Image: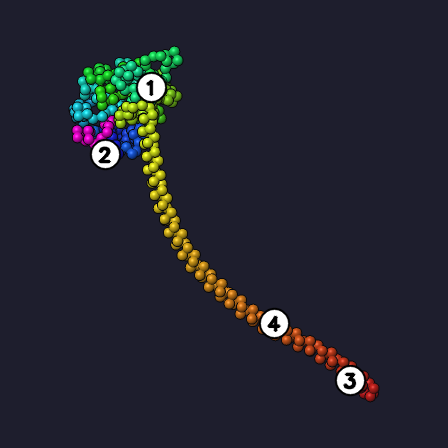
Amino acid sequence: MLHPRIAILNSEDADKWQGYVEELWGKIFRPPIILNEFKCFKNQFPTLDQAVNDYSLLIFGGSHYSVYDDFEWIRELERLIPLYVEKGAKIIGCCFGHQLIAKALGGKVGKNPSGEFLLGIENVLVDKQILRHAQLEDIFQSLLKIDNMSSADSSSSMCKCRFIESHGDQVVEIPPTAKVLASSASTPAEILWYPTNVLTFQFHPELTNEVVVDKIWRCVKERLTPEASLESYRQLTDILPDSAAFNAVLFAFAFDFRTDASAFVSSRIADAVEKVVVRTRSAIEDTDRAVAAEYETLEDMNHAASAKYAELAEFGSSMASLAMQTAEQQKSVMAEVEKLDDLEGQVDRLMAVAGKLNEETMGFMRELGI
């Protein structure tokens, strides 16, 4: 496969979750990984051949249904799970998926021992010794670094993490092939591992606090006591879960990063570099297209400007010609004006002579006694 593909076996058909399932898991398994959704509630399932040959991982997600609800598609999933496992498919199960896989592989699922719906942030204890014996320390290294144990318990064989819990049922009897990797005060089977290709968990690392408050707490708060409802809300608004660290575990498990921290980080860096390269290449191509479009626009503008300049040049030439003609005409007019000035001078001189002659004539007539 050019890019790894993951199958999401979606068991949630509530309207409020439509479009969210692939988006939420897509934040853990990002491109170039390809996610394909199978709507199990519409009887869509990967074939055995697809599960093994086409997909690097099968994700069995959460649901508002119970594994004991009498729906044919749930029974079909339960029938397929052992076959997927037998074929060697890599599988993770979350909440409903965690419970259904346990039931399909010989375990039992029942109501929470408290009889109450659990919603909030739970302290989950991961067993370091079991991880070591199962040779899973490399897979879980990102989680082991997020240890919330107090300094007094720092030497403990347990690693304390915080996760979002939202469930009314849980695994009450462990399947014979499963190993318990983590537990909590409310849920003894928080993380189960089925050597070597199946990892399941009761909590929700794919969800954010905000999503849980908006889409779950508002709907189930009436099922809780007033005190439990307020405490649930406080936890979901005040406490940040260790989801990012566990999501790194899921990524490492999915692609079998069983080396060391540097190899895992290098792989994530390589993924990041590939994303940057892809985005950069796309940006360059977009820029090239934009530049080409701008060049065509500028070329069109240049042609238009050239035409306008030609018009202006022609107009300027006409104006220059007109100016030259006007100048020549002005010279002729000025010459005529100068002639008029000379004529006016001559007239003035003639008038002066005429005046003098008139005075001389009047003097001559007085002498004659006329």
The magenta stretch spans residue 60 = yes
Local secondary structure at mark 2:
loop
Of the 4 image quadrants, the one containing the C terminus is bottom right
Q: Is 176 colored magenta in this rendering?
A: no
Q: Alpha carbon of mark 1 to alpha carbon of mark 2: how far?
A: 32 Å
User: Mark 4 or mark 3, which is nearer the start of the sequence?
Assistant: 4
Looking at the rendered structure, which numbered label has been put on residue 361? Answer: 3
Quarter of the view holding residue 53: top left
Residue type at numbered disc 4: Met
Q: Label 1: which residue?
A: 144
Q: Earlier in the sequence, mark 1 or mark 2?
A: 2
Residue corresponding to mark 4: 334
> Circle 2: is it few (<14), some (14-19), or many (20+) Cα within 10 Å?
few
**C-alpha gap between disc 4 and disc 2:** 95 Å
Q: Residue at x 37, y 17 (%)?
A: 148
Between 56 and 332, which is closer to the camera in this rendering?
56
User: Earlier along the polypeptide chain: callout 1 or callout 3?
Assistant: 1
In percent of the image, x 23 and y 27: which residue is there? 58
Q: CA distance from mark 1 to mark 3?
A: 142 Å
Residue 226 position by quadrant: top left
Region rendered in magenta: 47-64
Instruction: Please name the residue shown 19% across and 24% down the image.
Output: 85
Number of marks present in the image shown: 4
Asked if residue 292 is positioned above or below residue 127 in the image, the reply reads: below
Q: Secondary structure at mark 1?
A: helix
Q: Which residue is mark 2?
A: 1
Residue 289 position, x and y percent, is 35, 46
Do tag 3 and tag 4 residues touch (Cβ < 8 Å)? no
